[in-house]
Amino acid sequence: MAFLTIQELKTVAKTEHVQVIAGMDDTIIQECVNSGITEVMSRLTPSTKRNSFDGRQRYDVQAIFAKEGDQRHALILSYTKIVALWHLIIRGNAGIHYEVIQDRYDRAVAYMTALADGDATDLTLPTLPDEGNETGNKPNPFRMGSRRKFNHE
């Protein structure tokens, strides 16, 4: 079983609407589900930029999306469904209110971006261990001090 299945989209849109948009083709729906999962994973994955290692929470994305059934994080699952539905709905609007889905998508993306940037924190998600330097100490998020005093001598 995967993190999100086609059948679970029924909680965010009527099954009939999903089938009509996809042209009764489950492979299209599965592709949209996979795209949604990939997008959510990419938004939660820590950046390789230096400022991403400044002490903020970094989530173990592989562990989050390896869960199945009741072990999955409910909010991340819900947002993944919305993102998957967004990938499906851009194919055509068959009875689904486009603006409502767009608003949900924008909220989901904003929340995941806030999680990845450290503006929001979810203590129920697994985190990556802090990487220490060769002495085993944690890297400092910033450095302070001043330059040596300039002398004309």
Image: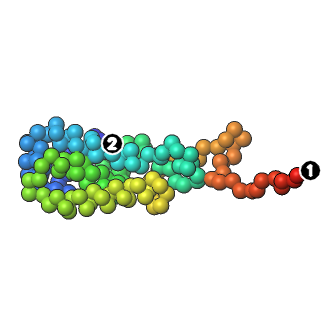
Q: Secondary structure at mark 1?
A: loop
Taking the image as shown, residue 76 lies to the left or right of residue 144, namely left
Query: In this view of the protein, can residue 67 be seen by the observer?
Result: no
Q: Secondary structure at mark 2?
A: helix
Name which residue type carries label 2.
Answer: Thr
| Residue at the extreme front of the image, as rendered | 152
- Residue 48, compared with residue 114, is above or below; it is above
Marker disc for residue 38: 2
Residue 25, position as x, y percentages in the image? 11, 39
**Image point (20%, 62%), residue name:** 100
**Image point (69%, 46%), residue name:** 137
Of callouts 1 and 2, the N-terminal one: 2
The residue pinned by badge 1 equals: 153
Work out whether residue 151 or residue 139 is closer to the camera in this orientation and state it. Answer: 151
Position of the N terminus by quadrant: top left
Work out whether residue 113 or residue 4 is closer to the camera in this orientation and state it. Answer: 113
Marker disc for residue 110: none
Query: In this view of the protein, can residue 46 be seen by the observer?
Result: yes
Q: Are marks 1 and 2 in contact (CB under 8 Å)?
A: no
Name which residue type carries label 1.
Answer: Glu
In this rendering, the label closer to the viewer, 1 or 2: 1
Q: CA distance from mark 1 to mark 2?
A: 62 Å
**Image point (37%, 45%), residue name:** 41
